[in-house]
Amino acid sequence: MTAIDIIAIDAALFILELDRVITYSRIEDDGERVVISLPAGYLNGDPNIGYDGETEARSRKISDSLGECGLRFSDGGCEDGGEYWVFVARA
C-alpha cells in the first residue's frame, strides 16, 4: 500500500468511528491489514442464526467503505460486547 492508500484507509476508519459504526480500529503492516471492533447484535440473541438488521447495515457500510480502499474481509471473532473483524489488502 502507498502512503495515499493508508491516508484513505485512515479517513474511512475515522468516518466509520465518527458515525458510530465501529468502536475501534487499527492499521497494521503498512495498510495491508486492518482490525476493527464493532457492536454486534444477533437474531434471537444467537450468533449462529445471523445478525440483526442493525448489524447487517453496519456490515454493509463497513464492507463498502473498506472495499473502496482495496480491502476485503478475512477473519473475525467475538469479543466482549461485540465482534472484531480483520480486513486485508486484495491480492
Image (spheres, rainbow, N blue to C red):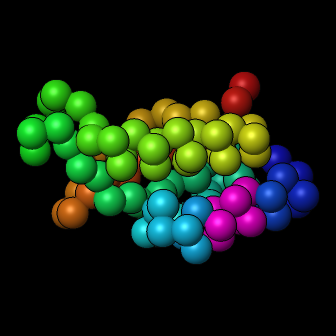
Q: What residue is at 55 percent from the left and 68 percent from the top?
A: 19
Q: Could you tell me how many numbered marks the image carries? A: 0
**Residue found 65% across the figure and 70% down from its top:** 14
Q: In which quarter of the view is residue 30 placed?
A: bottom right
Report the residue at 39% width, 58% height from top. 38
Q: Which residues are magenta?
A: 9-15
Q: Quadrant of the C terminus?
A: top right
34 inside magenta stretch: no
**Residue, far bottom:** 18
In the rendered image, residue 35, in percent from the top left (x then y), is placed at: 50, 55
- Magenta region, main secondary structure: helix
As rendered, which of 49 and 87 lies closer to the eye?
49
Residue drawn at the location 32% of the way across and 59% of the way down: 39
Percent across and percent down for residue 70 are 74, 38
* Of the pair 29 and 26, the residue shown nearer to us: 26
**Closest to the observer: 29 or 35?**
35
Up-down: is 67 above or below 31? above
Q: Is residue 69 left or right of residue 73?
A: right
**Residue 33 image point, x, y percent:** 60, 48
- Residue 45 x %, y %: 10, 44
Question: Is 84 on the left or on the right of 52, as rendered?
Answer: right
Q: Is residue 16 above or below residue 62?
A: below
Is residue 43 found left or right of 52 in the rendered image? left
Q: Is residue 13 magenta?
A: yes
**Residue toward you, 30 or 86:** 86
